[in-house]
Amino acid sequence: MMRTKLLSLVPRATVACRHMSSATKLTTVEVNDKTGIATLTMNRPPVNGLNLELLRDLQQSIEEIEGNKSCGLILTSSNPTIFSAGLDILEMYKPDKERIRAFWTQLQDVWLALYGSSVPTAAAINGHSPAGGCLLAASCEYRVMLPKFTIGLNETQLGIVAPQWFMSTYLSILPRREAERSLNQGRMFTTEEALRVGLVDEIASSKEEALAKCADFIATFAKVNPLARSLTKQQFRSADLQQLENERVQDLEKFLFFINQPAVQKGLGIYLESLKKKSKN
Ligand SMILES: CCCCCCCCCCCCC/C=C/C(=O)SCCNC(=O)CCNC(=O)[C@H](O)C(C)(C)COP(=O)(O)OP(=O)(O)OC[C@H]1O[C@@H](n2cnc3c(N)ncnc32)[C@H](O)[C@@H]1OP(=O)(O)O
């Protein structure tokens, strides 16, 4: 907060972008002084796996952006080929009892903050975006993706089940038939396929272009009354948000029960091994 206040004293002409949060975190926030748009970058090598710490930083950054009166939020990644590999499977495989509770609760918080954000949101998807990575992108209002990557909710391929609020997020973008079929299949879409079904809105040839297209989308609201816009967005999303708010505890217990099933643990172990083998080849 102190940092933000001090930065606001710096004459505007001298800085094009203000770094609002520290690079020691797993996320950074940069606010463009010209457009007022905040870019939130995930930075957890090697694959932006969503572990407890990255989720905490994501939530703090979203709150920071909500609090600093930014005109919009663009979510992206510092990794040139991976937006996010989704939930860090190591959080769910042979989990620590207390930590896994905190982890899932934090994921719920991030989704509530991002899906329910009062500012316009867009994702510059500059790399692969499976499962939890897709959830983050899909929680935004607009998506621009680079070619030759993949995106989708692939949970069933791992022998796990996307909970109701993952499904609601998909349903806020895709026609019901497409959402149901691709979730059942655990389908990963190529960039071109994602554009065709409407999972992404545009394709860009570079990260810079993706960020610019996201900024253009956010700029479409420049002349719209911000309160009217955000209350309208809230009305569209409130049923989904309320459902998770009302069922948070049950959702956590369902997750814990499911993830601790021996068959699920065995499946996650095999999947992790296959990822490790692949990375060694
Ligand atoms: C009645 C109804 C009941 C309902 C109940 C509901 C209960 C809820 C159940 C649980 C729901 C959970 C929802 C889960 C969501 C998820 O997000 S699960 C995660 C899914 N993610 C993936 O499948 C992606 C896996 N990764 C990849 O496909 C690739 O890594 C990549 C992202 C395409 C990148 O490829 P590449 O650049 O080639 O990198 P790699 O060499 O593959 O990986 C580098 C190292 O990173 C490790 N790694 C990759 N992904 C993950 C990950 N998600 N978690 C942990 N670690 C990961 C990989 O193993 C490599 O590690 P090293 O070998 O040690 O280098």
Image (spheres, rainbow, N blue to C red):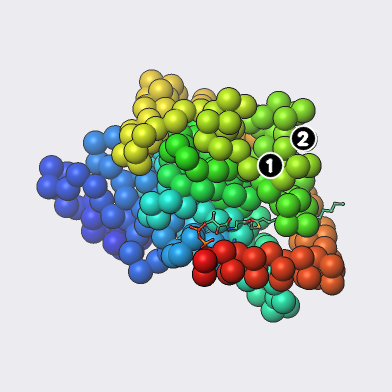
Describe residue 207's horizontal placement relative to residue 111 as left or right: left
Residue drawn at point x = 50 percent, y = 43 percent: 149
> Which of the two discs, 2 and 1, labels the residue nearer the N terminus?
2
Residue 190 shows in this picture: yes
Residue 199 position within the rendered picture, expressed as x and y whole percent measured from the top left? 59, 32
Q: Are marks 2 and 1 in contact (CB under 8 Å)?
A: yes
Residue 220 position within the rendered picture, expressed as x and y whole percent measured from the top left? 41, 23
Q: Determine the image quadrant of residue 271.
A: bottom right
What amino acid is found at the position of numbered circle 2 in the picture? Arg
Which secondary structure lies at badge 1?
loop
Residue drawn at point x = 61 percent, y = 46 percent: 135
Mark 1 nearby-residue class (10 Å; few <14, some 14–19, many ≥20):
many
Task: Please give the residue where the numbered disc 2 appears in the rendered image.
Answer: 181
Question: In this rendering, is residue 34 above or below 43?
Answer: above
Describe residue 149's horizontal placement relative to residue 33 as left or right: right
Mark 2 nearby-residue class (10 Å; few <14, some 14–19, many ≥20):
few
What amino acid is found at the position of numbered circle 1 in the picture? Arg
Looking at the rendering, in which quadrant would you find the N terminus? bottom left
Task: Please give the residue where the numbered disc 1 appears in the rendered image.
Answer: 187
In terms of depth relative to the viewer, which is nearer, 52 or 126? 126
Q: Determine the image quadrant of residue 267.
A: bottom right
Q: Residue furthest top?
A: 223
Image quadrant of ligand 1?
bottom right
Q: Residue furthest front?
A: 281
Give the alpha-carbon distance from disc 2 to disc 1, as whole Å.
Answer: 8 Å
Residue 116 position within the rendered picture, expressed as x and y whole percent measured from the top left? 59, 42
Q: Which mark is residue 140?
A: none
Residue drawn at point x = 57 percent, y = 32 percent: 194
Which secondary structure lies at badge 2?
helix
